[in-house]
């Protein structure tokens, strides 16, 4: 995947992946109709992509993606899945085999699905190419982040495994870069739901070796909560199948910035041990207060908030970042959140009490007409005892991860 950079900045500007076709096709997604359009329109209304206010502000470049080709999609998906998913919908034969590929219930086939799959995969791969080719340190693709799509199955509103495709792309070493070792990719998933398909794609149960890819999902977990997966639980240290490169931090209802602030040192210690070259972040916003999921009580600003986490990753961590979207079913709040995160990535966060600019989409943002997504009144059920259990478990996991990484270094020296 090559990237066509529309304009060049002085020093590694933040790449914003956008085209009219991408927004048009992403807006067809049945679970999030017109969300992409509102997100882009709000970012445009704040003039984030065109202003360069002062020297502390990074410049943005708009990078136009092209649709992914079949060969790029086949890097992960099966031929049969693609053939069926991208065919014209609704003849009798199609209806018969739909369940086999998950294309029913929450993942119905829809008009424009072929363009949707190729444009979203192409956009995320373009973002990956931009950071791999060192044109940018940070790439943003809010239309990506489809973390439930499997190799041969659509699931949970996700039809294309763009996160997996991007990770596979980034882990392939460039001859000119990192000559001493293969690149490491860390995947951090902040969506309300567990990143089942991404975690499973790179999971090596019981393996005693190291991995180029580490997946970490922080998500809500409760009996029967989607997606049900054994990997969604807190890892069991004594399990012979433990893979310290497939990690989960399950949280309980009402998770707030306070809880994220408490567990965040674990995330940073994992990063410090793994030392990724690339960090792919799924920034699903369905855990924010006000989402129809009504499960967490996360906020956009302040210590421990989503904005704070993204600031840490983009501005405090080493490694290049690919920021992707994900879930988020309060469309105006998704637009607020991803607009704010775009400004955070650009180095000049918008004030959260900023008025929404008066533009054609203005009325979507009533009644507050401000950018913030504040916490609500839900009680945080992540008790001190539960948080201590997470910390104690991760003390052991981190020790295992550390020993794996050290043994890899020793092997490299030998
Ligand atoms: Zn979700």
Image (spheres, helix red, strand yellow):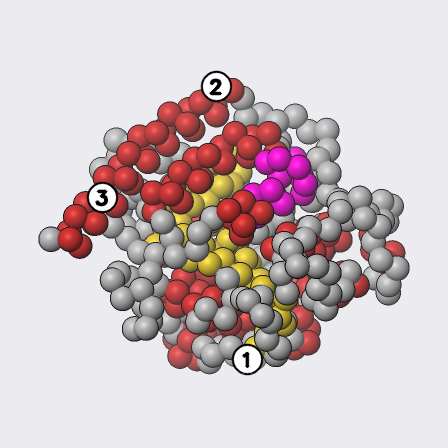
Label 2 crowding class (10 Å Cα cut-off): few <14, some 14-19, many 20+? Answer: few
Can you identify the residue that label 3 sits on? 406
Query: Residue 134, percent across and down?
Result: 46, 69
- Residue occupying the point 77% across, 60% down: 46
Which numbered dot is residue 385? Answer: 2
- Residue occupying the point 47% across, 79% down: 2
Secondary structure type for disc 3: helix
In the rendered image, the vertical position of residue 332 relative to residue 120, given as above or below: above
Q: Earlier in the sequence, mark 2 or mark 1?
A: 1
Asked if residue 406 can be seen in this view, the reply is yes
Which numbered dot is residue 4? Answer: 1
Label 3 crowding class (10 Å Cα cut-off): few <14, some 14-19, many 20+? Answer: some
Q: Give the spatial CA distance, label 2 vs label 1.
A: 51 Å
For the record, the magenta segment spans 293-310
Q: In this view, does 209 lie to the left or right of 244?
A: left
Q: Give the spatial CA distance, label 3 vs label 1.
A: 39 Å
Q: Nearer the viewer, residue 227 or 166?
A: 166
**Label 2, ligand 1: CB separation under 8 Å:** no
- Residue occupying the point 44% across, 65% down: 166
304 drawn magenta: yes
Asked if residue 64 can be seen in this view, the reply is no
Q: Nearer the viewer, residue 46 or 153?
A: 46
Secondary structure type for disc 2: helix
């Amino acid at each position: 995947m090559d990237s066509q950079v529309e304009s060049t900045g002085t020093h590694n500007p933040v790449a914003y992946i956008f085209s009219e076709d991408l927004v048009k096709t992403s807006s067809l997604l049945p679970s999030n109709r017109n969300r992409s359009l509102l997100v882009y329109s709000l970012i445009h209304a704040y003039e984030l992509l065109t202003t360069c206010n002062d020297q502390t502000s990074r410049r943005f470049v708009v990078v136009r993606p092209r649709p992914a080709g079949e060969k790029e999609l086949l890097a992960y998906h099966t031929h049969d899945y693609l053939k069926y998913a991208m065919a014209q919908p609704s003849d009798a034969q199609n209806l018969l085999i739909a369940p086999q590929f998950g294309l029913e219930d929450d993942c119905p086939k829809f008009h424009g699905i072929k363009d949707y799959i190729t444009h979203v995969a192409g956009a995320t791969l373009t973002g990956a190419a931009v950071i791999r080719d060192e044109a940018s340190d940070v790439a943003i693709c809010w239309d990506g982040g489809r973390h439930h799509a499997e190799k041969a199955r659509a699931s949970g509103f996700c039809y294309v495994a763009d996160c997996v495709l991007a990770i596979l792309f980034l882990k392939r070493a460039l001859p000119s870069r990192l000559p001493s070792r293969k690149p490491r990719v860390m995947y951090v998933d902040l969506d309300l739901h567990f990143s089942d398909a991404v975690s499973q794609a790179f999971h090596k149960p019981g393996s005693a070796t190291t991995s180029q890819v580490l997946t970490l999902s922080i998500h809500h977990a409760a009996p029967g909560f989607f997606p049900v997966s054994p990997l969604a639980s807190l890892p069991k240290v004594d399990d012979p199948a433990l893979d310290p490169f497939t990690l989960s931090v399950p949280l309980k209802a009402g998770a707030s910035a306070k809880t994220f602030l408490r567990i965040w040192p674990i995330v940073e210690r994992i990063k410090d041990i793994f030392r990724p070259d690339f960090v792919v972040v799924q920034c699903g916003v369905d855990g924010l207060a006000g989402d129809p999921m009504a499960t967490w009580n996360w906020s956009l600003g302040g210590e421990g908030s989503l904005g704070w986490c993204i600031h840490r990753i983009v501005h405090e961590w080493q490694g290049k970042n690919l920021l992707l979207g994900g879930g988020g079913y309060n469309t105006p709040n998704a637009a607020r959140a991803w607009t704010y995160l775009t400004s955070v990535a650009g180095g000049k966060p918008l004030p959260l009490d900023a008025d929404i600019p008066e533009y054609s989409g203005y009325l979507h943002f009533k009644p507050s007409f401000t950018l913030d997504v504040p916490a609500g009144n839900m009680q945080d059920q992540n008790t001190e005892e539960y948080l201590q259990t997470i910390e104690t478990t991760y003390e052991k996991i981190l020790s295992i991860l550390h020993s794996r990484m050290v043994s890899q270094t020793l092997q490299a020296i030998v």
